[in-house]
């Protein structure tokens, strides 16, 4: 299994910021792990021309329909046409800000697969759910409801992002990360039989200073990185830590 460093630029980035991608490629021409950047949709095509096979690209969301009267939305086929190979689905910001349910996420996953994209399905608990001791129950429900039948190691990546750790500078303990990632592996194995090839990413305030210790945790196969992926120096350090 090749480990994966995925950067989620969220609603950040203009054409001038493509210089950060150029710097990342120059600093890590053969990084030893797969590197993926999910920029805003406006930058997918120009970034694809720049990446030229040296890093992978993904979308940050897609519509469940292949086409139609859905003003402002982007289909999975459009992402693929622009150069994407992956798409992030079910991110906590989409679930919270746009009211996306597990069923809605599952429909988008099916659309992504139909377009040949690998779905990065995000799961994670809120601070209140963590404090109530409901973390594993929340994760299990999200996994059951958000991932439809047909998942394989080739078309699915799962990202655990505790909501209370995203952009806050806080992170779970290494033992807490291990507990969730071990459960994710067990849940996938129960559904798929052999889930050893499905990559499990940790996300939530991953930084150059804590990346190496997080990547040493059992069943952590990489990271989904937010703010630190916007700068080549920071994301490059995380890539280097993952590559070993």
Image (cartoon, rainbow, N blue to C red):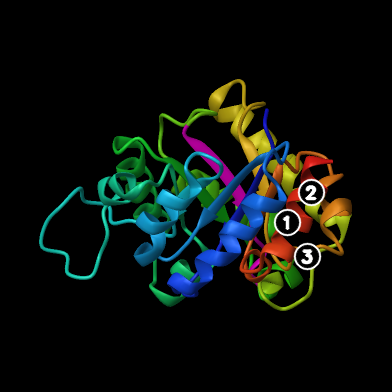
The 10 Å Cα crowd at callout 2, few under 14, some 14 to 19, many 20 or more, is some
- The picture places residue 155, in percent across and down from the top left corner, at 46, 34
How many numbered marks have been drawn onto this rendered protein structure? 3
Q: Are marks 3 and 1 in contact (CB under 8 Å)?
A: no
Which of the two residues, 203 or 11, is positioned nearer the viewer here?
A: 11
3D distance between C-alphas at marks 3 and 2: 12 Å
Which of the two residues, 208 or 135, is positioned nearer the viewer here?
A: 208
- The residue at the point 37 percent across, 46 percent down is 83
Work out whether 4 lies above or below 99. above
Q: Which residue in the structure is indicated by mark 2?
A: 240
Is residue 160 part of the magenta span, yes or no? yes
The 10 Å Cα crowd at callout 3, few under 14, some 14 to 19, many 20 or more, is some
Quadrant location, the N terminus:
top right
Disc 3 versus disc 2: nearer the observer: 2
Q: Which residues are magenta?
A: 155-163
- The residue at the point 89 percent across, 53 percent down is 213
3D distance between C-alphas at marks 1 and 2: 6 Å
User: Which badge, 3 or 2, comes first in the chain's sequence?
Assistant: 3
Q: Secondary structure at mark 3?
A: loop
Q: Secondary structure at mark 1?
A: helix
Q: Which residue in the structure is indicated by mark 3?
A: 207
- The picture places residue 102, in percent across and down from the top left corner, at 43, 55
Q: Which residue in the structure is indicated by mark 1?
A: 236
Q: Quadrant of residue 118?
A: top left
Q: Are marks 1 and 2 in contact (CB under 8 Å)?
A: yes
Is residue 205 part of the magenta span, yes or no? no
Indicate left or right for 97 with 37 as reference: left
The 10 Å Cα crowd at callout 1, few under 14, some 14 to 19, many 20 or more, is many
- The picture places residue 170, in percent across and down from the top left corner, at 79, 74
Give the residue furthest to the top.
193
């Amino acid at each position: 299994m090749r480990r994966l460093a995925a950067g989620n630029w969220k609603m950040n980035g203009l054409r001038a910021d493509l210089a950060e991608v150029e710097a990342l490629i120059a600093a890590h021409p053969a990084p030893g792990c797969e590197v993926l950047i999910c920029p805003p949709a406006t930058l997918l095509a120009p970034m694809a021309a720049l990446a030229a096979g040296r890093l992978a690209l993904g979308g940050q969301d897609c519509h469940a329909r292949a086409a139609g009267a859905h003003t402002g939305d982007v289909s999975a086929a459009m992402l693929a046409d622009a150069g994407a190979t992956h798409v992030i689905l079910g991110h906590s910001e989409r679930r919270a800000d746009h009211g996306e349910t597990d069923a809605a996420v599952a429909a988008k996953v099916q659309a992504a697969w139909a377009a040949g994209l690998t779905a990065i399905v995000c799961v994670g608990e809120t601070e209140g759910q963590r404090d109530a001791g409901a973390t594993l129950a929340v994760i299990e429900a999200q996994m059951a409801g958000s991932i439809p039948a047909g998942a394989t190691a080739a078309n699915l990546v799962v990202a655990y992002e505790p909501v209370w750790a995203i952009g806050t500078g806080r992170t779970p303990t290494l033992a807490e990360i291990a507990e969730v990632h071990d459960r994710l592996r067990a849940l996938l194995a129960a559904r798929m039989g052999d889930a050893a090839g499905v990559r499990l990413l940790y996300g939530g305030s991953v930084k150059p200073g804590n990346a190496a210790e997080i990547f040493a945790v059992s069943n952590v196969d990489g990271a989904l990185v937010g703010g630190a992926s916007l700068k080549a120096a920071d994301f490059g350090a995380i890539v280097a830590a993952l590559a070993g």
